Image (tube, helix red, strand yellow):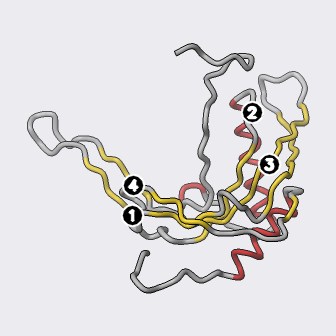
Amino acid sequence: MATPGTLPSLNSQCIYRALKMARLLNCHVSEWSRFDRKHYFYGDMPAGYQITQNHHPIAKNGNFGFWVFDEHLDVPYWKEVKILQLQLEQDSGKTIHLPSTSSEGGEGPKSLIDYNRAGCALIEIVTSPCFETAIEAIRFVQTLRLLIIHHNLSNGELHKGHLRVDANVSLERDTVPVEK
């Protein structure tokens, strides 16, 4: 965690797991990759930067297929997701926002930060913007989680932070940008 005069060291188990995940997602493994510092200030990033492979990832250009099914669907269908890149990076801390404890002049809202996972390695998987329904996104995460657990890459326990999902929602309709 940003100790002056120290350099990060590469964990061989992280590389092994990232390469295994890349193969499972049919990714092209890069001949070389590089770590960069992404500088930004946020309360749960104590160093003021994150070590990431955002620009030169360990793997890219993969695909992952899974069945989409739901009680509201008449027929299940197969969905292919393009994996843009798979990268290693440092995890940040966990911010917990608590509401106000009293409406009558008591304490206002608080934010707590748990640094227990800060600096730990993680694998980030970036997909193309291809999910058309919420159920597709749900089935993708469920199937990916089962794959990760089956191949002993992680325990996949969402409530413990072993697997997290960041969703970005496009406001475009039929590839026409929404007017400002």
Residue at the image point whose x is 40% and y is 81% from the top: 3
Which residue is under mark 2?
A: 131
Q: Are marks 1 and 3 in contact (CB under 8 Å)?
A: no
Q: Earlier in the sequence, mark 2 or mark 3?
A: 3
Q: Earlier in the sequence, mark 4 or mark 1?
A: 4
Report x, y in % for residue 108.
18, 42
Q: Secondary structure at mark 4?
A: loop
Is 128 situated left or right of 116 in this image?
Answer: right
Q: Secondary structure at mark 3?
A: strand
Amino acid carrying mark 3 in the image: Ile
Of labels 2 and 3, the one closer to you = 3
Is 84 situated left or right of 74 in this image?
Answer: left
Residue at the image point whose x is 51% and y is 64% from the top: 50
Is 35 situated left or right of 71 in this image?
Answer: left
Between the residue at mark 2 and the residue at mark 3, the CA separation in whole angstroms equals 12 Å
Quadrant location of the N terminus in the rendered image:
bottom left
Of labels 4 and 1, the one closer to you = 4
Between the residue at mark 3 and the residue at mark 4, the CA separation in whole angstroms equals 28 Å
Q: Residues within 10 Å of mark 2 (few under 14, many from 20)?
A: some
Q: Are marks 2 and 4 in contact (CB under 8 Å)?
A: no
Amino acid carrying mark 1 in the image: Asp
Q: Secondary structure at mark 1?
A: strand
Amino acid carrying mark 2 in the image: Phe
Of labels 2 and 4, the one closer to you = 4
- Residue 42's label in the rendered image is 4
Q: Are marks 4 and 1 in contact (CB under 8 Å)?
A: no
Between the residue at mark 1 and the residue at mark 3, the CA separation in whole angstroms equals 30 Å
Q: Earlier in the sequence, mark 2 or mark 4?
A: 4
Report x, y in % for residue 68.
83, 35
Which residue is under mark 1?
A: 114
Between the residue at mark 1 and the residue at mark 2, the CA separation in whole angstroms equals 32 Å
Which residue is under mark 3?
A: 83
